Amino acid sequence: MVAKTYAWRKWSVLPGFGLAMGYTLLYLSLIVLIPLAGTFLKAATLTWPDFWETITSARALASYRLTFGASFVAAGVNGIFGLIVAWVLVRYKFPGRRLVDALVDLPFALPTAVAGIALTTIYSPNGWVGKLVEPWGIKIAFTPLGITLALVFIGLPFVVRTVQPVLEDLEPEVEQVAASLGANRWQTFWRVIVPTLLPSVLTGFALSFARAVGEYGSVIFIAGNMPMKTEITPLLIIIKLEQYDYAGATALAVAMLVVSFGMLLFINLLQWWGTRRHVS
Amino acid sequence: MKIEVQNVTKRFGGFTALDNVNLEVQSGELLALLGPSGCGKTTLLRILSGLEFADSGQVLFDGEDATSQSVRARRVGFVFQHYALFRHMTVFENIAFGLRVRRTGRPSRVGIRSRVEELLKLVRLESLAQRYPAQLSGGQRQRVALARALAVEPRVLLLDEPFGALDAKVRQELRRWLRRLHDEVQITSVFVTHDQEEALEVADRVVVMNRGRVEQIGPPDQVYHHPATPFVCDFLGNVNLFECEIKNGRAFVGGVPFDLAESPPESTRTALVYVRPHQLDVLHDPVGPNNLPATIKLINPAGPQVKLELTTDWGQIIHADLSQERYRSLQLQPATRVFLATKEMKVFHAA
Amino acid sequence: MKNQQQGRIARSIAERATTEPRWIRWGLIGVALAFLAVFVVLPLAVVFVAALQKGLYTYWESISDPMALAAIKLTFIAAGIAVPLNMVFGVAASWAIAKFDFPGKQVLTTLIDLPFSVSPVVSGLIFVLIFGLQGWFGPWLNDHDIKIIFAVPGIVLATIFVTFPFVARELIPLMQAQGTEEEEAALTLGAGGWQTFRRVTLPNIKWGLLYGVILCNARAMGEFGAVSVVSGHIRGLTNTMPLHIEILYNEYHSAAAFAVASLLALLALVTLALKSIVEWRVKQQLRGGRHTLVEEPTT
């Protein structure tokens, strides 16, 4: 009997691949790929010098400094406090722990506009917190500090939710072994626990940062929106749109998209690094 | 139903899982696919079921080409190693599933109910019909999986390491139960295992596989007592292998001549010979020229037989099994020098 | 008696080795709670306090104002279209990704994650570029008198874009963790594709699906940046609730703004509550069902 060879391959024996994949690709094309392509094509209508000038204008640069700077600081704050919150939620028992755990997700669930006006109200000079710090001459609302605090709110869940599962998976045996080998609590923490948590903390930081960079609704009210001082990049894009400077708006959008893709890639790499080190 | 596998090859990327495999499953027999991990036995089983497709070759069911048939069309019953029970359905619903999803020839509710009850009685789980899989032990889940596969009256039953995830004692009980079940139901069955004891105890015929190839096919006592290759010999039960010279029909192991149980071909000069641990006898003093000296290293007296580990003068480790009485009569101590004798040494053709 | 004592001592030594001294523990708890109180509880509280600061009558007036009602209606329409569509997408995408092996899977999952890393303003902009007057399809749409940007369809599109990952991201890991064996078993028993999906897969993922839908809905109703760009802010016509809140706030109708905002805040709280319940169910399903082993059975 001559052996027959099969030219076709089946991806798997389960049915429905064609249908599922087809619908997925169609949807993605319509909703994501085509609009994105349009954006890049529109940006391409600008000459390179024009493009470059738009994205490096003094006003744009000031907005980058503000947007990225505030996002970085906010992500850093979230990195530290998010780790503490995750630790406390996973390791300790205290009354109301479940409630606190659920509340951590509030910045996810609360619409950004609502957060925006709430934060502005709190931090403006006659708001609850604004009133407290005014005697010391500290202004929060309508300054970069206010923007940063708003971004802390927005990014809060990211670090906590990324670190929590890793902490939960941490086997107590590992720490017991360290202790049996003579390490005190601080050493165990630094040498054993922190390296395991590091990829997830960094991932949470990166996610928080990426979210903060693009944030609009929560920041727009507290920002003050003064050009060169308290103007965030997304606002600059909107202003250009309102002035019908589509090309300029697109140029800035493309710059932001490039950063977004970069962040996405970086986050994926971090997560891959994390799974490589984290043996479950 | 008879199954024929002809020249089946399967590759996963650069790895060849099956290399030109040929075998026949007789109608009504219980066939074991035996081999170490990675030998291709599960791949072969899945190709028989239609859950995988061969790169080349053919699979025939009762003479008809089933190679490109879908899983559904083949009407095979498959029992997964980890049971794959539908976790959100009760035992009853699991077993009834195959009957309920039938498009043509679907039995009535009453019909389905009676069939499921019949099967529950067959696998002796009548009282657990309303339980969920998470509430069952491993052995119980496996029996449900079996009942579920049998419910649709498949042409052949395929089992993938059915007892692999169970405790040793449960494994033993269930394998005997499977044999009895097969005798009762009389359905062509193929099961995959890496446990040679299981294969030898349960199957009508055993297919020993290694690295994608079939090493030997035959009834259990044939593959055990007349292994065709060194791999089969070593895989089925423990064995002591020696390289030696053949002169005048005798094997010279470490200079000691041994009579061979079967005469080797005329022209053999060097060969691999083997003898199983329980075929060796231990003596304090040699009674003839064909006794091999060795030193006892370890004695393990716990168990149905006493297991000895000895070293030859050239450093090879030998295993010998003695009955409890023989051991007691010899009064052996570790680190003593003894002599080994056997009448059962067999040879492979070519070293 | 002595054994008990020894046991207790041994346990406390083990504990001391793997837990922090009490003062550190309570110190950390205090820091965490203070942080959350300032950054989470405070904003939530102020929404409700400010909403009621001018009394219940003003509160009621603000949310029953015709413009507010139109905004609420539009919010529900946008979510009502976006969420089901995204649900179907989520199921299709996770079926393809979790149950099959094909090259480019990583690219696909990255594409699905895209809206999470793109600024909402940019998300809205890309639709303006395609469908706006100056966009690709602009002239064609104008000729056929179809309005997408500055009209409801544009808002729906922007909402779809921003929220489509939620269901998929929830289902993909869940379905991957559940594996393909149950579906394969169903096939060997004679079930067809749709039968397998309906009877075997769907019950196993129903809680994960619900979870994704809840999150998707919360985001859809609350989306601001993207919708702001495509809507044109036409009062009564193209304002969703968040946009309406913005307008009220910028016109110094602070109490009214917070009144409408409180509705969304309530929605957020309901979302959190549902989320917690469903999360617990998902964990159970992964473990293998509501009904777990209670007694020790024999073989």
Image (spheres, coloured by chain):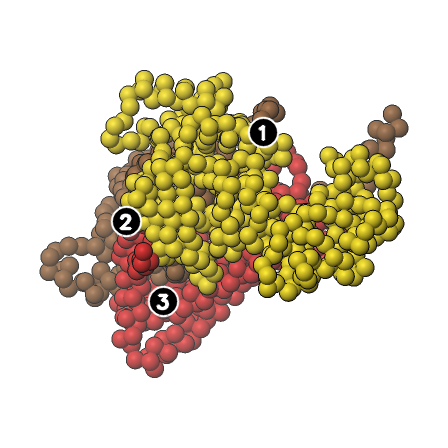
User: Which disc, if any, is residue B281?
Assistant: none
Q: Residue at x 51, y 30 (%)?
A: B179
Q: Which colour is chain B painted?
A: yellow
The amino acid type of the residue labelled 2 equals Leu
Q: Give me the chain that's red.
A: A
The residue indicated by pointer 2 is: A19
Q: Amino acid at mark 1?
A: Glu
In the picture provided, is B13 more to the left or to the right than B106? right
Is C54 or B13 nearer to us in this picture?
B13
Question: Relative to the observer, which residue lies in front, C201 or B318?
Answer: B318
- Judging by the rendered image, the residue that carries numbered circle 1 is B173
Q: Nearer the viewer, residue C220 or B127?
A: B127
Q: Which mark is residue A253?
A: 3
| Percent of width and height locating residue B14 | 46, 63
Discs 2 and 3 lie in a common subunit: yes
Tell me if I can see residue B181 in this picture. Answer: yes
Chain bearing tag 3 is: A
Chain C: colour as depicted: brown
Report how far apart the C-alphas of labels 2 and 1 lie in the structure. 46 Å
- Camera-side mark, 3 or 1: 1
